Structures are given as structure tokens and as C-alpha cells.
Amino acid sequence: MPERLGPPRRTPLFQRLAIIGFGLIGSSIARAAKRLSLAGSVVAVDCEEAVLQRARALGVADEATADLVVAVRGADLVILCVPVGAYAAVTQAMAGALAPGAIVSDVGSVKGAVIAQVQPYLPQGVHFVPAHPVAGTEHSGPDAGFATLFHNRWCILTPPDGADGQAVDKLREFWAAMGSNVEIMSAQHHDLVLAITSHVPHLIAYNIVGTAADLEEVTQSEVIKFSAGGFRDFTRIAASDPTMWRDVFLNNKEAVLEMLGRFNEDLASLQRAIRWGDGEALFNLFTRTRAIRRGIISLGQETPEPDFGRRREE
Amino acid sequence: MPERLGPPRRTPLFQRLAIIGFGLIGSSIARAAKRLSLAGSVVAVDCEEAVLQRARALGVADEATADLVVAVRGADLVILCVPVGAYAAVTQAMAGALAPGAIVSDVGSVKGAVIAQVQPYLPQGVHFVPAHPVAGTEHSGPDAGFATLFHNRWCILTPPDGADGQAVDKLREFWAAMGSNVEIMSAQHHDLVLAITSHVPHLIAYNIVGTAADLEEVTQSEVIKFSAGGFRDFTRIAASDPTMWRDVFLNNKEAVLEMLGRFNEDLASLQRAIRWGDGEALFNLFTRTRAIRRGIISLGQETPEPDFGRRREE
């Protein structure tokens, strides 16, 4: 699935874009914004000096600083790209320097908790429009970013009640320009949808990789060698950023526990079918699940190539 | 990961190779055997006329027939590539026609139950060497096969006690010629290793796709749209052949239930960590699991490209 971005804009959408946290997502936004001329200037903010050095070396931001206040001063769009556990502290630290009329947004994978943590600290006249681009890879850091990461992916906006309509529209235009399909829903519904399409899948992937690592009867080298039987697919997700994912689970507790409860019920029923040799129950489920993948492929959210296109024959 | 096979052999390893069941795996063996001249002639057997027609049209077998007895007569290598639930019936049907000295093998994902189902029906002088190539894709049928499917993958042989050493060596040579790394272990150990590296991963993938399909609060269209958050990875495995996988679970019950028990224990502990906000427990597991993926990549069993190399930027 090669991806292509459109031509650069003649006039930028924003004058000054401050990206707080310059990892995979932050640096991908910077790359796309630069390439498409979405912002007059792009400022990279990170608390790690090594990350700032990479931002400078990669040339994907116009400024790179550890100083939040300097970064957001005069910015008309500020996007939080740090783990969601750091939102409250970051917002408190920058709140006093935010310009009236500025839009504050984010890219966090949970939305209800984020709104609760950010909104109380924002001054009047600053527009808060939470966002979640459903995109990423298992790699982390500024070098892992790329400009087409959001292309043909969904970006969900969850504006709180009373959000400024113009601010929402402008943020929608920003994400659409990067190639995303933008959808608006409530934070509560977002957290439920993502619990099943993202959070629980990550949890069970982390879990099975942990279970396999702890076995005594099967060595780690055997797990690695024979991983092509299915296991290795799970290791990709279980290689995702630990801090980010810890914060996701701590901040979407209710929805994750609810979805996990359903997953567990269903798994108990499969376990019972295996124990009692109920082949029909197994066959029926295994047939039903094929249709979902066909839907994902036909919507352009997945490659139709076998094995994710991993191997190409010479 | 482009794959390349070696040059064809000057003299074939086997005179007549009968492949019983001509789906993804059977047709891949036929393609590799033809291309590498591993057998004087390759006979495709299938109970479905449509499959035999495809085998003929693809030109990947010298003969294609629904008649087991005709197919195995004179064959010095017979490989069962049907779902393991059909092994006993197939073996009974062909047993009388097997040539003395012939090797009977298979490609099943379970081994203990397979030995119990096949061995009693084999005549004296026929050598049974069970095999399991740890390779495949989510696609099924003769058209899905390709000659390099087994290249750089492991193939596990589980010869029963008293198996003929020469027969084992010859089968090892056959798989090695197709590019596989061959390993020998007991059927019991195989079933335990594969329960964690393949069977339980398939079960939980099928399970979460089923859970997602059944939700009332989240629509199927939302699950499909926002699947790039992790869920879609699971749908690949959950698109695997339903009959094959039903039979795997029915025939590796003990090991699957044992590994599933451990998976459930570990998941309960993660669930508890989420409920009680134990970020440290989550972070520790999420950090530990990254190492396993690095091992799989460094052993050449996985692509190092982000996202399985799914998307390539133009």
C-alpha cells in the first residue's frame, strides 16, 4: 500500500505549530506539516536533549526546545504528543503562556480521562479539541516517524460540550490535509470503541508474549524459532512503547475492564468447547471471523496480500 | 524478505510423490518439489473436483486424481495434507495400496493425536515419519500455494520410537531441499511448543474477533474502520482455515488447555493491575516483551520493517 500526500498549501493553516513530545507521532506530524506547508513554523518540544538533537539533525522542525513556555508562546496550534499520564503536568506548565484563541489538541489513545486532566488548567479563550489519530507502528522515537503515517487512517475528534465550532473545523482541516479521514464522536464512545479495537488487543498481545517467556517446559529459543505459527504476529504489538501503553490502561480502566470481561467470557466458552470436543461451536466461530477481515481489507485499512505482504518471492 | 530456492537436483530424491489434500500446503509442496526436481512425478489427490481442476490448470502436478489407491500405488513418499480430523479415514482407505518401503508423512499442526490415528492402520514395512512445517498464510486452497513457503522456516519431524533412521534422513533431506531448517523432537514436546507458539495465539485471535463482532455498543463498521489501532493484526490469523483449526483444537486438547490456563492466569493478574492502578506491573511486563520480538527478528523469522512492512511510502 504505497501512500502519497497531496501538494503543499499556498498559505499555511496555522502560523505556529508547537508539538509537545517528539516521538513517532509528534515527528510524523512535523514531517507532514512541513511537507504540506500546514504551518508557518513548526516547533518541536521534548524533555530529552537527545530527542531534540535528533529533531534538529533530521531537519523536520524549525525550532527544537525543552522550554514549553517559549514553544507555545504565539502558537495558534499546540498538540500534546506525550504519554497521557503527563498531560496534566504539561498543561499546567504551559497554560500561562498560551495565546488567546489558540487551539490545544492532542493525539492520545484515551479521551475521557484526557479531557478531565487538561481542561481544568486551560485559560478562558483557549480552545480544547482532543484528537486521536488511529495510526502508528511498533517503533518509537523521532527517527521512526514518517510523513504518510496518517494517510488513509482515521482521526477521531472528541470535542467537549460547548467546543468552538471554528476551532473544530480548523483541526479537522489540518488532519484531512495529512490524508486522514476525520470522524467526530463523544469521548465516552471513543473510549469504548478503542478499548475493543486497540486497547484489549494490545493487552492480550503483551500478555501472551509474557506467558510464553515464562514457560519452563518450552525454552525461549523454541518460542522464537517456531514463532511463525502465529505467535510472532503478537510480538509486533507487544513491542509497542511501554510508557504510552501503561498510561492508556491506567486512563481507560472502565472500558478496558468491560471489554476484557466480554473477551474472557467468550474465551471461557471456547475453552469449554475444546474440553468437551464441541467441534461445531469452534467451526462456527472460525467461519464467522473471516468476514470481518474481508471488511477491513475492502475498506482499505489492511493489505490483501497474504501474511501482511511480509515475504515476496523472487 | 525475498526468498530464493536453490537449483534443481540432478536425480530426484523420490520416484513418486503423492500429496493427499491439495490446499495451501499441499500445492506449495508440489510447486517446490517440481521446481527443485525432488520427485520423478508428483500426484495431487483431493476429494473436491474443483481443486483437482485447479491443480491441472496450474500445472503444478503431473497427475491429479480423487482416487487415493491409484495415487499412492508405487509412491515412495506419501504426504497427508488434509485436516488432521481426516487422517484416520484417509489412512484406512489407502493402507492396502501402500508400497513396501514407502514413507508416509504429513504436515499436521498436532503430532501426538496424529500418530495415534495413523500408525495402527499402516502395514508393516511402511515407514511413518510425521512432520510439521511451521509455515503458512491465512489464505487457503491450491491457488494460495507458492514454492518458497517453507524457505527459512522450521520443519519439525517427530519420528515415533523405533522409526527407520534412513526414512527419517530422507525426509529431512526433502524438507532441507525446500529451504527448511529441520528439527527433530518428540510428538509430546512438539504439541506443547506449538500450543503456545501457534494454537493458543490462533484461539485468542479468533476469540477477540468474535467478541468484537458481537458488541451492541460498538458497531461492526466502527470495529472495521478503527481496526488499525491493533485489532486488524488479529484478523489475519482469525481468517485462517476453519476446518483445519477446528481439528487442531480437538486433537491437541491437553496442551492447549494447559497453555490457555497459564494465559488466563497471567491475564487475570494484568486485569487486577489495571483495576488497582498498578502502573509498575504493567510497565514491567510491557518492557520485557520487546526483547522477544528482537530475538525473532534477529533469527530471520520476522521482518524488521515497521508494521510488517505493510505500507511503503512513495
Image: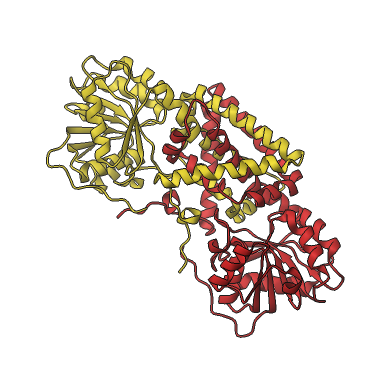
Chain colours: A yellow, B red
Q: Relative to A240, is B145 on the left or the right?
A: right
> What residue appears at the point 58 percent right and 41 percent down from the top-left corner?
A288
Residue A217 versus residue B66: which sits nearer the camera? Answer: B66
Residue B106 versus residue B82: which sits nearer the camera? Answer: B82
Image coords of residue A18 (percent x, y):
24, 32
Label count reads 0
Q: Quadrant of the C terminus of chain B?
A: bottom left
Image coords of residue A286 (percent x, y):
61, 44
Name the outermost residue toward the front: B49
Image coords of residue A19 (percent x, y):
27, 34
Residue B261 versus residue A89: which sits nearer the camera? Answer: B261
Q: Relative to B46, is B280 on the left or the right?
A: left
Name the outermost residue toward the left: A10
Residue B239 versus residue B306: which sits nearer the camera? Answer: B239
Query: Can see residue B8?
Result: yes
Residue B20 quadrant: bottom right
Query: Can see residue B180?
Result: no
Q: Relative to A151, is A265 on the left or the right?
A: right
Image coords of residue B202 (percent x, y):
61, 45
